[in-house]
Image (cartoon, grey):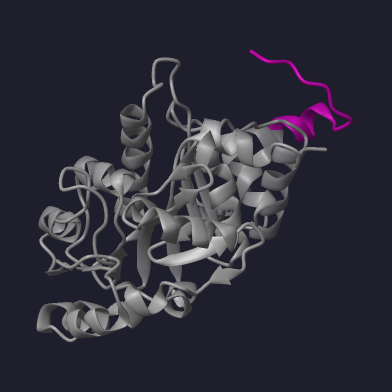
């Protein structure tokens, strides 16, 4: 048994310990304890506060072994986010696939906790989001809306992402079977007018929870970037693009490059910023600068990532 030192009298310590045990361990209410001890409910509340302050009762927060609580809190406070989930990668998790699976699993758990049947869930595209969908075991029967067209190879794009997530919970899905970036504004306008595309995009301003990936342009880890010609890539990088969310291009200082807006089929940056719960999902230290740029641009309320990227994000910020 742990011994403690206190300036309180022995009797006061014993009383506080008894009240704390009855409240925290036995589950009795403050009113019931007050009635049986002859003390006021206010006095019981004060004794509970005293028992915590004096170390009479101590709390231990137990989290899954993969969840890094301290680093999550560091990132949350440093970047003023609502919540952050940082998962610890094992020494053997050196591949991109294992990293995406770990981050995707954590993102799936966040979605399962946050989403309700009354929500409209928006999903972006990307390999980590595909991993998230594969790891998703339960979700309420909410409406699921794909927020952007697809990019990447046939084997790596998120063609069925919204439908897969919808099938888990049984909610209605609105997928987008169109490219993310097309050759010109006229083609984009034509595709947006198609009934299925128009129905999905019309729901964008009703999205209450969204999960989107962050793409890095420096270093290049973006399926969207790979879909552009070398000359287009060079031109946009010369303008300072370091990251993207959906089709919104972002510089390191958080400013936006609008060159692809008319050619893209995706939820606009204005709507993105208004979504009540916008979950950013990204992993690997190489994406740290990209995620910081996206946060500087005002996107994101929640971040799901791994310890390697989180450590890189905190580099230079610790006093």
- Relative side of 166 to 300, left or right: left
Q: Is residue 111 left or right of residue 171?
A: right
Residue 281 inside the magenta-drawn segment: no
Image quarter for residue 144?
bottom left
In the image, 130 versus 155, the foreground residue is: 155
Q: Is residue 237 above or below residue 21?
A: below
Residue 69 in view of the camera: yes
The spot of residue 172 in percent (x, y) is 12, 69
Q: Quadrant of the C terminus?
A: top right
Q: Quadrant of residue 5?
A: top right
Q: How many marks?
A: 0
240, above or below 73, in the image: below
114 vs 305: above or below: below
Of residue 26 and residue 300, the one placed in the foreground of this image is 300
Q: Nearer the viewer, residue 199 or 73?
A: 199
Question: What range is drawn magenta here?
Answer: 1-14
Near-viewer residue (28 or 144):
144
Q: Is residue 5 magenta?
A: yes
Residue at 38% across, 38% down = 103
> For residue 197, what is the image quadrant?
bottom left
Q: Position of residue 130 (x, y in %)?
A: 24, 46
Residue displayed at 57% across by 38% down: 310
Please name the residue shown 42% across and 30% down the image. Answer: 64
Q: Position of residue 269 (x, y in %)?
A: 46, 74
């Amino acid at each position: 048994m742990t011994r403690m030192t206190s300036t309180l009298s022995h009797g006061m310590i014993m009383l506080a310990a008894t009240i704390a045990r009855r409240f925290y361990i036995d589950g009795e209410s403050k009113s019931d304890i007050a009635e049986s001890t002859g003390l006021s409910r206010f006095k019981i509340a004060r004794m509970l506060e005293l028992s915590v302050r004096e170390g009479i009762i101590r709390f231990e927060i137990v989290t899954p072994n993969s969840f890094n609580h301290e680093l999550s809190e560091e990132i949350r406070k440093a970047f003023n986010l609502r919540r952050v989930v940082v998962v610890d990668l094992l020494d053997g998790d050196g591949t991109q696939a294992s990293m995406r699976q770990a981050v995707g699993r954590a993102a799936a758990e966040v979605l399962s906790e946050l989403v309700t049947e009354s929500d409209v869930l928006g999903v972006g595209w990307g390999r980590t989001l595909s991993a998230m969908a594969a790891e998703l075991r339960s979700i309420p029967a909410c409406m699921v809306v794909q927020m952007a067209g697809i990019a990447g190879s046939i084997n790596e794009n998120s063609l069925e992402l919204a439908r897969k997530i919808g099938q888990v919970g049984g909610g209605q899905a609105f997928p987008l079977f169109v490219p993310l970036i097309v050759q010109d504004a006229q083609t984009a306008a034509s595709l947006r007018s198609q009934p299925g595309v128009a129905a999905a995009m019309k729901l964008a301003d009703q999205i209450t929870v969204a999960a989107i990936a962050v793409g890095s342009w420096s270093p290049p880890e973006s399926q969207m970037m790979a879909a552009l010609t070398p000359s287009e890539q060079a031109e946009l990088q010369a303008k300072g693009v370091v990251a993207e969310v959906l089709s919104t291009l972002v510089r390191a200082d958080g400013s936006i490059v609008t060159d692809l807006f008319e050619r893209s089929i995706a939820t606009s940056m204005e709507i993105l910023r208004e979504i009540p719960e916008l979950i950013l999902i990204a992993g690997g230290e190489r994406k740290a600068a990209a995620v910081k740029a996206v946060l500087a641009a005002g996107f994101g309320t929640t971040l799901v990532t791994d310890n390697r990227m989180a450590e890189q994000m905190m580099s230079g910020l610790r006093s």
